[in-house]
Amino acid sequence: MKRCLFPLFFASVIFFLSAFSHQSKVNISTHYYLKTKSQPLGISIILYRVGKADRIEDLSNLEKEIDKSKSVNLYKMTEDLAIIFMNTVDTYSDTAALPYKMLLGNYVEKQVGYRIINGFISTSEVVKICNWIHEHKIDSFEGFSKMYDALSQEAKQELEDIGSGDKKSLFEGYVQPLTEFYFAALKDNNAIVICGE
């Protein structure tokens, strides 16, 4: 009887140790992956034009100011656009860069009704972003096309890997509405808040 139990016990220990060892490796690699790899949000990124402000605290009635008619929805395309505007696959490397701010703003965390605001762009920064848009001529298909064609091979490969659209669909679907949104914000002296919804 002892001879039968010993191999069974030994096999159980090996199975337990291999399962425990495998589980530890999975947890460590998952933890490492999450710490080192920025992942795009699985939600729509929406920019809203609001009143003139240098700080988000200057806006006293944000819930009423957030209006769908004064917004642009980037859906899940912020990573694609950031790769193009910044010409890098590491789009989180320079959060102070105007192209980054144009898409995600300066980080804030503020609950407004059911929404959580995670980005803010001051009225004075809207002016700088519009100047950047003019300088790079991305408000026209020709200018955007020139920027797209000049991307590094690494950036082009990343766009292909994430299944990004062609430059015409990106321009018509996202870049043109985004630049029009910014010019409207400039004209109306707006600040901008950014939500993930």
Image (cartoon, helix red, strand yellow):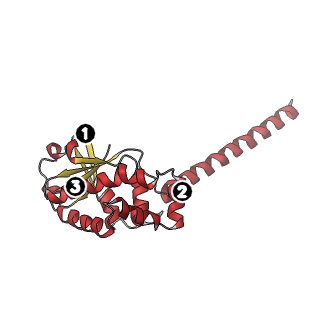
Residue 15: percent from left, percent from top: 73, 41
Query: Mark number for residue 32?
Result: 2
User: Amino acid type of disc 2?
Assistant: Tyr
Query: Which of the pair 57/78 is nearer the observer?
Result: 78
Give the structural element (helix, strand or loop) at label 3.
strand
Q: Quick one: quadrant of the C terminus?
A: top left
How packed mark 2 is, by other alpha carbons closer than 10 Å (few <14, some 14-19, many 20 or more), is few
Q: Quick one: quadrant of the N terminus?
A: top right
How packed mark 1 is, by other alpha carbons closer than 10 Å (few <14, some 14-19, many 20 or more), is few
User: Amino acid type of disc 3?
Assistant: Ile
What distance separates the C-alpha of mark 2 from that of mark 1? 32 Å
Q: Which residue is mark 1?
A: 114
Residue placed furthest toward the top:
1
Can residue 102 be seen here? The reply is yes
Q: Is residue 62 above or below residue 8?
A: below
Give the structural element (helix, strand or loop) at label 2.
helix
Q: Nearer the viewer, mark 2 or mark 1?
A: 1
Residue appearing at x 68%, y 43% in the figure: 19
Q: Which residue is mark 3?
A: 192
Residue placed furthest toward the bottom:
135
Which of the two discs, 3 and 1, labels the residue nearer the N terminus? Answer: 1
Give the structural element (helix, strand or loop) at label 1.
loop
Which of the two discs, 3 and 2, labels the residue nearer the N terminus? Answer: 2
Residue appearing at x 13%, y 53% in the figure: 51
What distance separates the C-alpha of mark 3 from that of mark 1? 18 Å
What distance separates the C-alpha of mark 3 from that of mark 2? 34 Å
Can residue 92 be seen here? The reply is no
Residue 154: percent from left, percent from top: 53, 65
